[in-house]
Amino acid sequence: MNHNTQLQIKELPPVGSQIYLMGICGTGMAALAGLLTELGYNVRGSDSAAYPPMSLVLERLGIDVTIGYTPENLKNPEGSLPALIIIGNVIRADNPEAQAAVSSGVPYISFPQAIELFFLKDRNPLVVAGTHGKTTTSTMLVSALDAGCSLDPGFMIGGMLQGYDAGFNKGSRPWFVLEGDEYDTAFFDKGPKFMHYRPFGAILTSIEFDHADIFQDIEAVKRAFRGFTSIIHPEGVLVACSQWPAVREVCNSASSRVVWYGDSPSDDWQLKDVKVHHAGTTFQARRHGTLVCQVDIPFPGMHNALNALAVLALGTELGLEPEDLARGLSMCRGVKRRQEVRGEPGGITVIDDFAHHPSAVKVTIEALKAKYDNRRLIVVFEPRTNTSRRSVFQERYSRAFDRADMVIVRSVPDPEKAPEGDRFSSEKLAQDISARGIDARCLPDATAILETLLEIAEKGDVIAIFSNGAFEGLHQRLLEGLAQLHQQKL
């Protein structure tokens, strides 16, 4: 196979021609499909399955999606091949449709290459990278630039922004906001996605071990981030969180100026007087010890205050007014699946969250307990990611749920996707959490979890469901079941 795809792209296909996306229903790929449609291309694609919210986005855009991968999919009903094929990183080299694409003679590129080639020319990319907080921080940055500074930034974010009903926008020059993922690019390009994004300004939120399926250890993770810091434009700026030792280490490779943020007096940008309340979080932003402004965000938690401070620091260092940025931050409506309240039937709050890494689980639970003080917090956890299916964080997960009042862990879905001998045990996690004095249980699937929740849930409870997938429709099924129970009590 010839995987030197960039040499195949001498110029972009003419507007109006057909572009085919393999893995089109992924969050990023569906957003890319939307952006290409905005540019005037005829987009279609394939995937193994389609489910909301991205399936609804594609349907709204009128984009044809074929379920299942076969070589025949590449040709349109008239029998013609597309002008360009974009292959998502979910596609493996042994996929029959991918093999047909590679041998078809049609140029093919990866998702990050497509972003670079179609959308970053003559733009100043602002890239948010880090193990945690990329999606939320990117969303805050969009709101600060758009609602606060009226700049209409382009953006590509791995989530559905509330208020935009999409994770993408072509926008206007010069700014283009990108969520910079360290995960590998494609089966023909094993480098991190963010190496294609040519950052002018960047935020580095955190670095710790993750993605055990592609990184051997923390040193491999740090090598990836060193590459990222080395490609930032020399006239740009890197805003980095001082609280992570690995971040301090990799920033030695930065090709740009580095500005530090955190809660230490030595930081360039410092948090002060952080207060978490029922409506969100307030804090003072200080620069070199001098008060810049008061910030009020509608999201709970110290981690979200740090994310907002990073946005304020980046925008200010790029020459924007901090008061405008702070106003935009206060107007940010967040992103779906990040502490998203899905409903409150019968006085029971149901929250959808993406958290899966033990650090993210821990800070999210802490933020929810601060916001919903004096209410019982029931956490439902599905270990579904490539990393959480493995045993690497087995022990760390047991401490991540300490602030929860009750924990329900789903049995690992598709455990065979992790190597034998390196598989996570939901049963052991429930036992370990119970040993720490918290009511915890392991249940086999969403149906069993639903039945249990409908039996035990009481008015005033907060039920937070942590999963990176559809979780067998648990969220909607729970909302409907709770609403039905409430009606029966009236």
Image: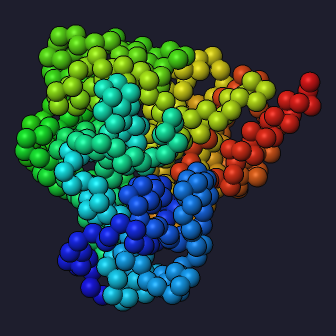
* Nearer to the camera, 235 or 346: 235
Position of 239 relative to 367 (above/below) = below
Across and down, in percent, residue 154 comes to 33, 44
Across and down, in percent, residue 33 comes to 45, 60
Q: Is residue 30 left or right of residue 52?
A: left
Q: In terms of image quadrants, where is residue 47?
A: bottom right
- Residue 284 seen in render: yes
Identify the residue shown where x is 61% and y is 32%: 341
Position of 443 relative to 36 (above/below) = above
Across and down, in percent, residue 108 comes to 33, 76
- Residue 213 seen in render: no
Across and down, in percent, residue 114 comes to 31, 63
Quarter that holds the N terminus: bottom left
- Number of labels in the image equals 0
Q: In terms of image quadrants, where is residue 139?
A: top left
* Nearer to the camera, 374 or 63: 63
Identify the residue shown where x is 74% and y is 42%: 478
Position of 422 relative to 78 (above/below) = above
